[in-house]
Structure formats: C-alpha cells, structure tokens
Image (cartoon, rainbow, N blue to C red):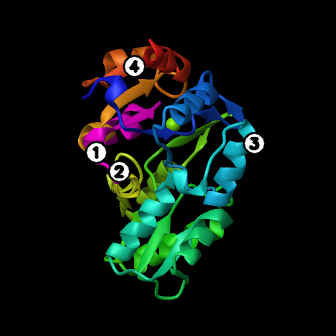
C-alpha cells in the first residue's frame, strides 16, 4: 500500500463505481477531471463483457466522461489474451453481438462444430438454444476447455441486480457438473494488460471498485493498492463482516477526490 498521492495510475471499475446504468455516480466526473489535470492515467476496468469497446466509449461519453478506446479494459480483452496464450482458435461462444464481435476482431473463429473451447459470458441475448449447445458440447467432451469471462453472480442496473455470468456458470454446473476457468476480476489477466499498457508495475497502481470479492480481491492478490467505494454493491455491514479489509474505504469517488485534494 502506498499513500494516495503517490499512486501513479488508477484502475477504475465501471458498474457501481463510476456509474449505475446511465447515471454517473457522485464525484465520478470531477474525479476524472482531477486525474486528467494532474496527468494521472485512469484505465476503466470492467468485468462486464456484454458491450464491445466502441459501445463502452459511447456509453461512458454519453454520461459526460471523455474517454479513449485504449482506456478501456474488460474481461473480454483478458479472455482473448488467455485464449491466445492457450493457442485456442476455434470457440463456441455464448455472448452478446458486442462480445462475439470482439472475439472475431481478435482473429478467433466462432463455431458450434468441434470447437477447441466453450466460452461463456454475461449474455443479454441469452437463449435456451445457446445454453443447450454449450451444455451438450461440455457433456460430449468432458476434457473440452471451458472458460467464463467473469464470476459476478449479478450485474447492478437501475431496475435492480440482474443475472450475470456467475449465474450462468451455476446453471451449467448444475446441468453438466463442469466448472470453468474464470478470467475476469479477481483473476490477474486485466492487471497484466493494464501494466503492459501503462508501462507500470502493479505496486504503482490502485484499483478502485465497489466489490470486495472481485475488484478488491484482485488488487490484494496482485499487489495493487485497494480502494473500496460504497456506492455500489458492498454495504458498510458487508465490510464489517469481511475477513480482510481494503487499504482505503470511501463512500464514493467524491469523498476520494476530497481526500486527494487535501
Ligand atoms: Mg462494480
């Protein structure tokens, strides 16, 4: 852990930290403007693979936050990095058109005939046919590599928490007995990508997020300073009951910004 003012770059979670649906959370716009003025790089960091990079740029810009495509890292990029490292080229993918488009752009071939892996994600276009195909592929080949983009059970929306990739992992576990390699936070794939992109070490970075078991655990496991905000999923009671604590806790980005400006 290093003092807040010595942090060289921030990895900033999106859902529940920067915004919820299309509403910026308190202090988000001001915090990013402070980082920009002080030349502190910020990378946006999300386990949510349901949007492609262009959709993220559009969504974040619409909220009033200027953003460049290279500032965004999602579990999609980390999953692609993992598939490449395993020499997997043909996959059966369960995902949104945005997710599938990113895989194709990265040179992966999508097929339901003899794929080298099944990849599942947070799919807002999920159908029974997709679940059935994934389950049958896993059933017929018990050693087929099986990868999931992120462990989150639910995604916060303005309507409330909705089923995320973790819930789909549970469904397929009950249907096939198989459990995937899970790539998103707290896995270190996105930290490695961020360090590579920034030319910095994990100890130079702080992760800011609203979830103990993804954002904060990833930071703790990979040597980053950890900053929890209580603007999303984690409540003060959850924090009190947790076995381990983040380095810093703030109500939201506005409170963090106040501290940085003191
Ligand atoms: Mg979050």
Residue 148 visible in image? no
Quickly name the residue at label 4: 249
Q: Is mark 4 within 8 Å of ligand 1?
A: no
The residue under the point 72% across, 37% down is 63
Name which residue lies at 50% across and 39% down.
13
Of tags 2 and 1, the one toward the viewer is 1
Of helix, strand and loop, which one carries label 2? helix
Quadrant in which residue 129 is drawn: bottom right
Task: Measure how far apart labels 3 and 2 are at the Cα level.
Answer: 27 Å
Question: For the residues marked 2 and 1, what is the alpha-carbon distance in whole angstroms?
Answer: 7 Å
Crowd tier of the residue under label 4, counting other residues whose Cα lies within 10 Å: few below 14, some 14–19, many 20 or above: some
Secondary structure of the residue carrying numbered label 3: helix
In this figure, which residue is indicated by the disc labeled 2?
191
Position above or below: 189 against 97 = above
Write down the region rendered in magenta: 199-218
Q: Position of residue 234 (x, y in %)?
A: 46, 25
Horizontally, residue 262 falls left or right of residue 15, namely left
Mark seen at residue 202: 1
Considering depth in this image, is 159 or 62 the residue closer to the camera? 62
Quarter of the image with the C terminus is top left
Looking at the figure, which quarter contains the N terminus? top left
Task: In this rendered view, identify the residue nearer to me: 183 or 220.
Answer: 220
**Which residue position is annotated with label 3?**
62
């Amino acid at each position: 852990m290093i003092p807040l003012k010595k942090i060289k770059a921030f990895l900033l979670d999106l859902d529940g930290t920067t915004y919820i649906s299309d509403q910026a959370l308190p202090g988000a716009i001001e915090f990013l403007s402070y980082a920009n003025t002080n030349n502190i790089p910020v990378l946006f960091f999300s386990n949510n693979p349901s949007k492609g990079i262009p959709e993220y740029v559009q969504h974040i810009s619409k909220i009033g936050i200027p953003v460049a495509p290279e500032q965004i890292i999602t579990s999609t990029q980390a999953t692609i990095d993992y598939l490449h490292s395993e020499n997997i080229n043909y996959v059966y993918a369960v995902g949104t058109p945005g997710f599938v488009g990113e895989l194709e752009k990265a040179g992966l071939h999508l097929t339901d005939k003899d794929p080298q892996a099944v990849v599942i994600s947070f799919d807002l276009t999920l159908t029974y046919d997709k679940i059935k195909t994934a389950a049958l592929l896993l059933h017929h080949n018990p050693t087929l590599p099986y990868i999931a983009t992120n462990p989150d059970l639910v995604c916060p929306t303005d309507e409330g928490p909705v089923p995320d990739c973790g819930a789909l992992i549970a469904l397929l576990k009950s249907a096939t007995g198989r459990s995937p390699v899970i790539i998103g936070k707290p896995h270190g794939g996105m930290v490695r990508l961020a360090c590579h992109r920034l030319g910095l070490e994990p100890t130079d970075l702080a992760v800011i997020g609203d979830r103990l078991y993804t954002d904060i655990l990833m930071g703790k496991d990979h040597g980053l300073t950890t900053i929890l905000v209580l603007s999303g999923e984690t409540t003060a009671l959850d924090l009190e009951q947790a076995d381990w604590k983040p380095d810093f806790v703030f109500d939201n980005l506005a409170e963090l910004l106040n501290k940085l400006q003191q």
